């Protein structure tokens, strides 16, 4: 599974776990909602600073947004 | 310590540990040597695909290039 896929799955899982909307997270991280939606779908080639900004808003370690999560199947592109 | 700093420190440590030159790693990852030099200095806002390309050449998990390494002091910017 690619880093972008892991990032998207973790981002969505953690955001939803905190009951935060895409609009709220995007606004707090200084991103467009459409960008965030694409990132959660694994379609954005995010930069380290963007990953860090999102991690800061969510209050998690950036690695938590990037590591393969047990629930992520390895047959994802 | 920022993700960019951790990335740079890990990248240089692992590359040197494999006895690989910046020229060789940059060429294999399809990057300019100057870009790699800046990344190792913590000055590049790399994308997830760039991190993944470098990890593939080095044969490590991309997370190994991004996680805080015990040797990395936390007083780094």
Image (tube, coloured by chain):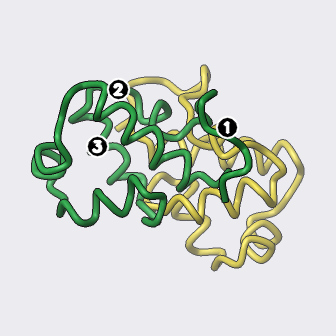
Chain colours: A yellow, B green
* Residue beneath the point at 32% across and 36% down: B55
Q: Which mark is residue A64?
A: 1
Position of residue A41 measured from the top left corner of the image (x, y, whole percent): 51, 54
Q: Are marks 2 and 3 in contact (CB under 8 Å)?
A: no
Q: Quadrant of residue A28?
A: bottom right
Question: Looking at the image, is mark 2 or mark 1 nearer the viewer?
Answer: 2
B10 relative to B38 in the view: left or right = right
Q: Which mark is residue A72?
A: none
- Decide: few, some or many residues near mark 2? Use Cα within 10 Å; few <14, some 14-19, many ≥20: few
Residue B70, above or below A26: above
Disc 2 secondary structure class: loop
* Residue beneath the point at 78% across and 66% down: A25
Q: Which mark is residue B54?
A: 3
Task: Please state the chain letter of the residue tagged with numbered disc 1 in the rendered image.
Answer: A
- Decide: few, some or many residues near mark 1? Use Cα within 10 Å; few <14, some 14-19, many ≥20: some
Residue reaching furthest to the right: A19
Same-subunit check for callouts 3 and 1 = no
* Residue beneath the point at 49% across and 33% down: B63
Task: Please state the chain letter of the residue tagged with numbered disc 2 in the rendered image.
Answer: B
Quarter of the image with the C terminus of chain B is bottom right
- Please tell me which of labels 2 and 3 falls first in the chain: 3
Q: CA distance from mark 2 to mark 3?
A: 9 Å
Q: Nearer the viewer, residue B32 or A67?
A: B32
Q: Are marks 3 and 1 in contact (CB under 8 Å)?
A: no
């Amino acid at each position: 599974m690619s880093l972008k896929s892991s990032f998207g799955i973790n981002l969505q899982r953690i955001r939803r776990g905190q009951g935060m909307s895409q609009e709220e997270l995007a606004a707090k991280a200084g991103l467009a909602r459409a960008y965030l939606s694409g990132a959660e779908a694994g379609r954005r080639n995010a930069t380290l600073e963007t990953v860090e900004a999102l991690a800061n808003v969510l209050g998690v370690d950036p690695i938590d947004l990037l590591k393969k999560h047990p629930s992520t199947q390895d047959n994802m592109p």
